[in-house]
Amino acid sequence: MASEYFSSSRSDWCALCKCFVQPHGNAKRMHERSEKHKKNVERKLKDIRHKEANEKKESDKLQKEMAEIEAKAAEAYAADLAAAARAREQEANAKRELETAIERELHAREEAEYRATQVLGAWKFDERSKYYWHAKSSCYFDPKTKMYFNNGTKVKLCRLRQLLRRQLTGSKCRLRSKP
Ligand SMILES: [Zn+2]
């Protein structure tokens, strides 16, 4: 521990023992061999080791804290990604549901239109006979006399209603039997 000394004109200072030592070799060796100096050297070494251990502990603690912060950040990032994926999936599901609903509605309208034409048929004006022709019930309607005809036979309005009603029930049965 020679570095613990500094020389002045009269004597050397031992910083460990906080005392002056005579600057000649014999006195210095005597001091270095003394119990007091040896104990102080030991204590100094112990202090250094203790300080190093504390520093390591602090550094380990800091590293652990950093690792925890990083882990939490990674966790939050993963959660954000998952939330974004869920939101995208929900959006896609909602879009699919809307598309399905539109598809169903269009189909229902088509079906309703189809049923209406099946039940009522369509009256078409025939230019030659000047009668309306109802293909579904094979009926003619004369707008002048307001009379209905069926296969050349005059039918009354109630008869046509009967025909239409029969078609209506028949049509309903057909639709009900559909899967
Ligand atoms: Zn000393």
Image (tube, rainbow, N blue to C red):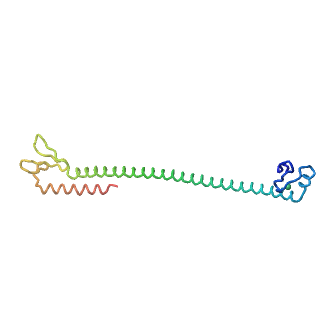
Relative side of 136 to 127, left or right:
right
Relative side of 122 to 110, left or right:
left
Q: Quadrant of the C terminus?
A: bottom left
Relative side of 95 to 86, left or right:
left
Residue 41, how many percent across, how many down?
A: 84, 56
Residue 2, how many percent across, how many down?
A: 85, 49
Quadrant of the image occupied by residue 53? bottom right
Residue at point 52%, 53% (across, down): 79
> Looking at this rendering, what residue extends furthest in the front direction?
10
Residue at point 81%, 54% (across, down): 15
User: 25 or 165: nearer the eye?
Assistant: 25
Relative side of 60 to 30, left or right:
left
Residue 162, how many percent across, how many down?
A: 16, 57
User: 71 or 3: nearer the eye?
Assistant: 3
Q: Ligand 1: which quarter?
A: bottom right
> Looking at this rendering, what residue extends furthest in the left direction?
145
Residue at point 85%, 59% (across, down): 39
User: 65 or 154: nearer the eye?
Assistant: 65
Residue 61, how many percent across, how many down?
A: 67, 56
User: 61 or 71: nearer the eye?
Assistant: 61
